[in-house]
């Protein structure tokens, strides 16, 4: 199984700050198969970025993604209060589809 | 509007069975692969099962293989998860998710979740 190591496990940021989350895969995967989800407290997950760098419908432009091979990143250019959530990477390259452990974003 | 609504969750004793349902609306259900994903309390997401559009192909991780069965009824736009021989570690919120058309296996719509507690 492909293991996804996400870091950091938590971030405390100020509004307007730039934050970056890293997701490293135990095996190389095509960028088509790396996705990011946002889960706000008490809510279900929501797709934010698919295939490494494409924003899902309705997602603000401050969210972006990049990467290739085994190293991927997710960035919020200017954090807003509504971005408080846990973010997960997920690979759809091979069964079992796996998720990273999550990164919890809190505001300072 | 795409909607996925899970039902059937509850408290069940270890070793017993439970069946979850997911009612889909707002899209052509038969055109999409579907999946179940679970989240143990205060933990991360774990993929549980995937089913093809016709239901002929199913996929499971080792943690549930042989105990869980995913199925679908395209005529009713419904997805199911039959869970047998339940263990305490199966306690979680179970989400029904739609896989986007194509091969990227991205989950582009989620239900609100059904809570399952396995305890004596």
Image: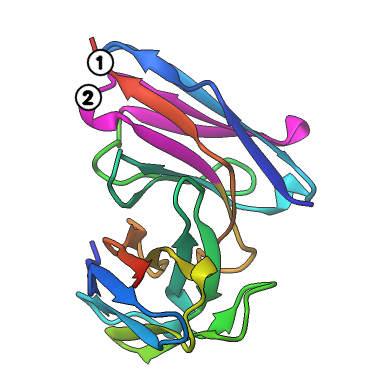
Q: Is residue A89 visible?
A: yes
Q: Residue at x 28, y 47 (%)?
A: B43
Q: Chain of mark 2?
A: B
Q: Residue at x 36, y 65 (%)?
A: A94
Q: Is residue B114 above or below residue B26?
A: above
x%, y% of residue A104? 32, 64
**Residue contact at pointers 1 and 2, CB within 8 angstroms:** yes
Q: CA distance from mark 1 to mark 2?
A: 6 Å
Q: Residues within 10 Å of mark 2 (few under 14, many from 20)?
A: some
Q: Residue at x 28, y 86 (%)?
A: A71
In the visual, does A56 lie left or right of A27? right
Instruction: Give the quadrant of the C terminus of chain B.
Output: top left
Using the image, tell me which numbered label, if any, was put on residue B119. 1
x%, y% of residue A59? 63, 75
Label 2 secondary element: helix
B68 inside magenta stretch: yes
Magenta span of residues:
B67-96
Q: Residue furthest front?
A: A108
In the visual, does B32 lie left or right of B89? right
x%, y% of residue B92? 35, 34
Using the image, tell me which numbered label, if any, was put on residue B88. 2
B18 inside magenta stretch: no
Instruction: Out of B18 and A100, give the one closest to the viewer.
Output: A100
């Amino acid at each position: 199984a492909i293991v996804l190591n996400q870091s950091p496990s938590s971030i405390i940021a100020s509004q307007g700050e730039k934050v970056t989350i890293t997701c490293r895969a135990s095996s190389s995967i095509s960028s088509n198969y790396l996705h990011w989800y946002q889960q706000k407290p008490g809510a279900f997950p929501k797709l934010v970025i698919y295939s490494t760098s494409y924003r899902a419908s309705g997602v603000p432009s401050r969210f972006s993604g990049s990467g290739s091979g085994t190293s991927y990143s997710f960035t919020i250019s200017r954090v807003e209060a509504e971005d408080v959530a846990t973010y997960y990477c997920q690979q759809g390259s091979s069964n079992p589809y796996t998720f990273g452990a999550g990164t919890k974003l809190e505001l300072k | 509007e795409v909607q996925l609504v899970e039902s059937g969750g509850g408290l069940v004793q270890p070793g017993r069975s439970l069946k979850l349902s997911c009612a889909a609306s707002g899209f052509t259900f038969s055109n999409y692969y579907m999946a179940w994903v679970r989240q143990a309390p205060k933990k991360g997401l774990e993929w549980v099962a995937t089913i093809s559009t016709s239901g002929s192909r199913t996929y499971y991780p080792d943690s549930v293989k042989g105990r869980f069965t995913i199925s679908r009824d395209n005529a009713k736009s419904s997805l199911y998860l039959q869970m047998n021989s339940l263990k305490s570690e199966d306690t979680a919120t179970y989400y029904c998710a739609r896989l986007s058309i194509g091969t990227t296996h991205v989950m582009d719509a989620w239900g609100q979740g059904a809570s399952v507690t396995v305890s004596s």
